[in-house]
Image (cartoon, helix red, strand yellow):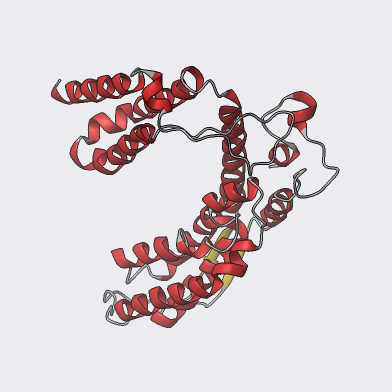
Amino acid sequence: MLRYKYLLISAVILLSLFFVNSEIFAAGTLTPDTNAVQTEHSVQHILPATIMILPFIVLLLMIATGPLFYRHFWEKHYPKVAIILGLITVGYYLFVLHDTLTLVNTLAEYLSFIALLSSLFVASGGILIKVDKKSSPMINVIFLLIGAVISNIIGTTGASMLLIRPYIKMNQNRIKPYHIIFFIFIVSNIGGALTPIGDPPLFLGFLRGVPFFWVIENIWYIWLPTIAMLLAVFYLFDIRNPGKETTQINFSGKIEFKGLKNLGFLAIIIIAVFIDPAVIPGVPNLYEMFGLPFGIREIIM
């Protein structure tokens, strides 16, 4: 009951902050953005009050501490907590800022984001790579480097789904926690920082008009030494790992691929990213035509 009490207190505090006089919230807002492109659907661009970052901070803190300190409660109720915190933010935009356009635009971006991630996840998960080859520190370094590059093409989620199984299989007799940690660092996170497909926040920037190749043109010289340093540290760990002494295993050295038809699906998904009225003139805008918060790109995905 004590943990429920803490949750109730937190909810009451947040709700109290939310229902404070709207003039206090409005004090933190900005004047209309004169640099923004105005269309017939645009409204004055008003930023929310700084205090409205609290629901996001609370959610992040609970994600970080929930599995450690109140695991059973968090596993059972985290969707409810997320929904409540989300509704507080939605309510602020609706009843304080009276801004529905931002909510619609955010929903459209969220649908695009989920469509990309889920489609890459499903398509990559259908490809199986069987590597019957003994690993070594240098082979692992090359494997992780390839994974970092691939994550920019099929996304960090897709690359992780595609490569984690052969990576673990190769290191079955010498697998250690650091193998997984560096895989997450290099393939699942930092590796995909060069393209909007590789990094979800960059994809949101692409949806808002940032050129697709802007990131790779401007940060490749940061990405490259970062990956190199991580691989160097990984190599130092790996050369100190002799592995377990087990019965002799005969490796054939073969590499087999199954589900290659999914490569076609991945190609379709990647091409669909560019099917956007803002990128290709003439592509129908389903929002303007039918008021839908998604486009042809999301339907294809």
177 or 105, which lies in front? 105
Residue 235 in sight here:
yes
Residue 251 in sight here:
no
Above or below, comparing residue 220 to residue 9 in the picture: below
Q: Position of residue 251 (x, y in %)?
A: 47, 77
Residue 230 picture quarter = bottom left
Residue 301 picture quarter = top right
Is 92 left or right of 42, judged from the image as shown? left
Above or below, comparing residue 146 to residue 279 in the picture: below
28 or 244, which lies in front? 28
The residue lying at 62 percent from left, 69 percent from top is 217
219 or 161, which lies in front? 219
Above or below, comparing residue 133 to residue 25 in the picture: below
Q: Where is residue 247 in the image (x, y as percent from the top left)?
A: 31, 75
Q: Position of residue 62 (x, y in %)?
A: 28, 37
Q: Where is residue 127 in the image (x, y as percent from the top left)?
A: 60, 56
Residue 110 picture quarter = top right
Is 41 left or right of 3, judged from the image as shown? right
Above or below, comparing residue 181 to residue 277 in the picture: below
Is 201 left or right of 140, judged from the image as shown? right
Q: In which quarter of the image is the N terminus?
A: top left
